[in-house]
Image (cartoon, rainbow, N blue to C red):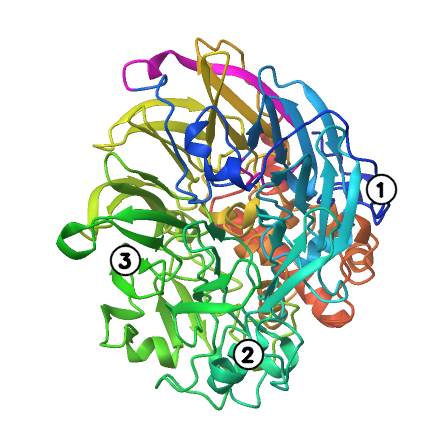
Amino acid sequence: MTYLKSAIAVALSSFLIACGSDQSATNEAVEAPSVPVAAVDTDRIKNAAAEPEMWLTYGGSYDETRHSQLGQINGDTVQNLGVDWVFEMDKPRGAEATPVVVDGVMYVTGSWSIVYAVDARTGEELWTYDPKVSGEDAAKGCCDVVNRGVAVHNGKVFVGVFDGRLEALDAATGDVLWSNVTVDQSKPYTITGAPRVFKDKVIVGNSGAELGVRGYVTAYNVETGDLEWRFYTVPNPNKEPDGAMSDAIFAELANDSWGDTGAWTTDGGGGTVWDSIVYDTVNDQVLIGVGNGSPWNASVRDPEGDFGGDYDNLFLSSILALDADTGAYRWHYQGTPRDQWDFTATAQMMLVDLPLGEDGAPRRVVMQAPKNGFFYVVDAADGELISATPFAQQNWTTGELDENGRPILVQEAIDLNGYAVMPGPTGAHNWHPMSYNPDTGFVYIPTNVALPYVYASNEASRNAKSIWNTGYDAGMAWAYEYPKGTIAYTQTLDGGSLVAWDPVAAEPAWIVPFPQAFNGGTLSTDGGLVFQGNKRGEFVAYDASTGERVWSQRLVGDAAAAPMTYELDGEQYVSVLSGWGNVSMMIYGAALEKPVTQEPGRIVTFKLGGDAELPSPLEYLVDETPKTALVGDPESWQLGMQRFAENCQFCHGAYAISSGVIPDLRWSDVSASEEIWASVVRDGILNDNGMVGFSDIINDDEIEAIRKYVIRQAWLAVENGNAQAPELAAAAGE
């Protein structure tokens, strides 16, 4: 991409995030195909182990262990693994989906909820469906316009669309069979997670707690799209019945765990179910992982409450079991009572049998390693806690639980007067899927370490102007200036590990440290390997027993998504999505050694003897020099920093340092012009492209203060030796 710097039109184009439109997909029914395609039903997914050559559902099977019995690719043969084919998606941004492969066809999603059907042998496109998500809806997302995948059932492909639709597509053609709006689209709801299918139902959750909504899950009839049942995860503000399956347990238990005042009564309370949903075939129940509170700050969300146990704010940060047929409450386990740290319990759950019963008898358990840093083993039948052990560094608790299974908090984590909590809201483990190998008995967890967050409830948090709904000071950890070496130090904080966790011994078996966090999900195979991508853009195979790195391949983008494997014509394939994007790339640009480019999402597929070549990466051609003289003063820079932290850093990066996925405002001609800046940031002239106007949140003086802060950041980079002044850059080019 070439960045020209003269014409205003070109200056505006450099500010684009991605293209979208507000065109809606049709709701009209389309006649189903006569030839069976994607002939998947509940029984077939139940028996997924009998078809290891397929990958029939998001987590590989209903138990979602992400382990494959295929072993053609193993420690002896992996050195012959090469790229076989590459499929390039239509748009850039984060690629987080796990493909589903059924009878030779791969179904997968990219950014903006676009669905692709691809020949799994060759990578040839069969059809593409674009739900035409409006660019304006991008502002409703906390963490990029991502999607984690589809569900396939009886000739249909189900996708949760970013703007809140659940749609059933004809698996043969991609035509829309039915489409339901599952959320109030006037509120900041999104859908990023993969739907799940069981029996005659498809179930989907939603996202948006950071911006202020109320969470729930909904089950629809797979054939008609009719609503079968809905379960809210937190009470409504008046604690009155909703006419939903959650009414009974709210009246019995959950209503009393909330006060009668506070921001939750206006902002929804949170508890969105934005990722993990598991169908337990043995107990005929659905397990859902419930998200964080809204606002995060419990003293703002529910000021009548405390941490003594009376106001736990059910069912925030909980594993919740519901009857599969009716949606009625079965049981719950709350890992983080009265959550105020964004410790969602939405991370992947898996079901396995472990020798934890009497005399070592098998016991069916749920395992989860959520953001709060505890690895949980819970009885699947009744929710009894079996063990909870820290798997990563933390300082919000003592690392122990009390006799009631509640974490023992440290007082500083309750008071939050500028306390740097570990893990921060990025979590000890985020959405990136883990896997379980029944032969080694290990769970392979992509963890984050050393990413603390300074939570502060102060005057700035009370006077914040933002669509983000945290109740904390977003600018507490930042400043309008910083000493030389700060960015280099920031890069040392961006760490992670691949942890092989023994859930029976409740301890790590081995750990492979990484110099960066937010590494990709994992895949375990009978070949004795663990596959994982990392944020450096590598795809790696490890020995499942020892953690030894045995093979790697450089990709064009990163591989945050979990890989999967399948077999066709006697050949085993491994596929993974790559692309630059998601919240880790957008917010933590300062943690990268160098910016990345706006690469399209790709499906990269490997097999033994594969000899295809990956495309060359795009060249980063941004002129990293200030485009205007320094303007403003310390007062305006401080105000601009505060408003930038509250509204802009989530896309354009902390310290105003972009990863490259989204334009770096420091080097933009838009920032150089007060008039163009106002037309974009205030008036929203690029609204359709994802850059909405902020005139309803911040005033003209604050909008201009943000511009002055961004320009200050450009010149600060020059002062600290991270960029050149324009005259020096020009001289160097002569």
Range of magenta residues: 75-98
User: What residue would you read off at disc 3?
Assistant: 393
Q: What's under tag 3, amino acid-wise?
A: Gln
Residue 374 visible in this rendered orientation of the protein: no
User: What residue would you read off at disc 1?
Assistant: 9
- Residues at marks 3 and 1, CA–CA distance in whole angstroms: 49 Å
Local secondary structure at mark 1: helix
Q: Is residue 609 above or below residue 639?
A: above
Local secondary structure at mark 2: helix
Point out which mark residue 155 bears. Answer: none
Q: Is residue 287 above or below residue 642?
A: above
Q: What's under tag 2, amino acid-wise?
A: Ala
Q: Residues within 10 Å of mark 2 (few under 14, many from 20)?
A: some
Give the image quarter of residue 389.
Answer: bottom left
Point out which mark residue 248 bears. Answer: 2
Q: Is residue 87 magenta?
A: yes
Residue 131 is situated, as x and y percent measured from the top left of the image, at: 77, 43
Q: Nearer the viewer, mark 1 or mark 2?
A: 2
Q: Is residue 548 above or below residue 696?
A: above
